[in-house]
Image (cartoon, helix red, strand yellow):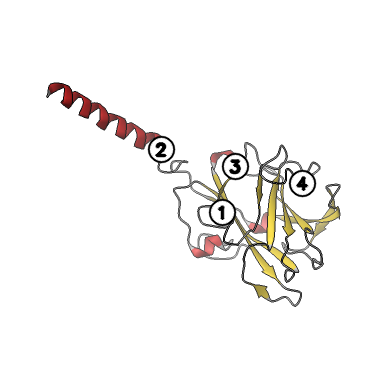
Amino acid sequence: MKKLGIILAILVVLSFAGCASSGGGGGGGEPPFIVDLSTLTQLRIIDQSNSSVAEPVQGLRNIVPFTRNWQGMVIKFPENFVDVSKYQRVTVTLRYFNSSGEELAPRDSMGMLVFIYDIKGDWHGPEMGAGPNTPLKEMNVGGFSAMVSTERGSRHGMNRAPEAIFIQKAQDPNVAFIELSGVIFHNANFKFDAPQLQGKGPEGTDPE
């Protein structure tokens, strides 16, 4: 009986140690970082295949409508961006519009995104998964199969701040315009309200 009591005591200690090490989903008490959309800049693409851009253009929605699959836009983060390595996950939301400017309900095959470290480097990366300059690639943003557009978000694995996001129209023929509507870096143990998931601040006010 004495041996059984010792074994049970050890199991209890191990179970508490496991709970403490799990951290409730990671990140401890680090509050989520809601990116202020007004600090982001869209850059005009000169040559998408050559990863080259020019001067800024207005807004976070493409100015010229997309007419072909895989056309894209580049959204640049500000200098001295937050230390993203403190956060395990990122949630990104996009809005989609047809050629008449009417908003479309998000679903698979409408858009994809790639986080890029160096805007002068590769924007595309491997066909699937991360690459040296593309730490996170997500297909079907806003659709059923994309984690990045959910409250839980996607694990990003970034060890330094990204310089930009490359956003592309996918294969849905109705999509003519895409707008970046929210970026939140966070850890798995946080919950967001609807305004935050729509790219708005804690008080539900649009930062623009």
What SS does tag 3 mark? helix
Residue 59 at what x, y percent from top left?
74, 63
Which residue is rendered at x = 53% and y = 60% of the image?
196
Q: Which residue is mark 1?
A: 147
Question: In the image shown, does 35 or 183 lie closer to the viewer?
Answer: 183
Q: Are marks 4 and 2 in contact (CB under 8 Å)?
A: no
- Of 32 and 176, nearer the camera is 176
For the C terminus, which image quadrant? bottom right
Q: Position of residue 6 (x, y in %)?
A: 19, 24
User: Which residue occupies the extreme left position in the image?
Assistant: 1
Which residue is disc 4 drawn over? 123
4 or 3: tag closer to the N-terminus: 3
**Residue kind at label 3, given as amino acid type:** Val
* Nearer-the-camera pick, 34 or 89: 89
Secondary structure beneath dot 2 equals helix
Q: Viewer-nearest of labels 4 and 3?
A: 4
C-alpha span from label 4 to label 2: 34 Å
Q: Secondary structure at mark 4?
A: loop
Q: Find out whether the residues at labels 3 and 2 contact each other: C-beta distance under 8 Å.
A: no
Q: Position of residue 185 (x, y in %)?
A: 56, 49
Kind of residue sitting beneath label 1: Met
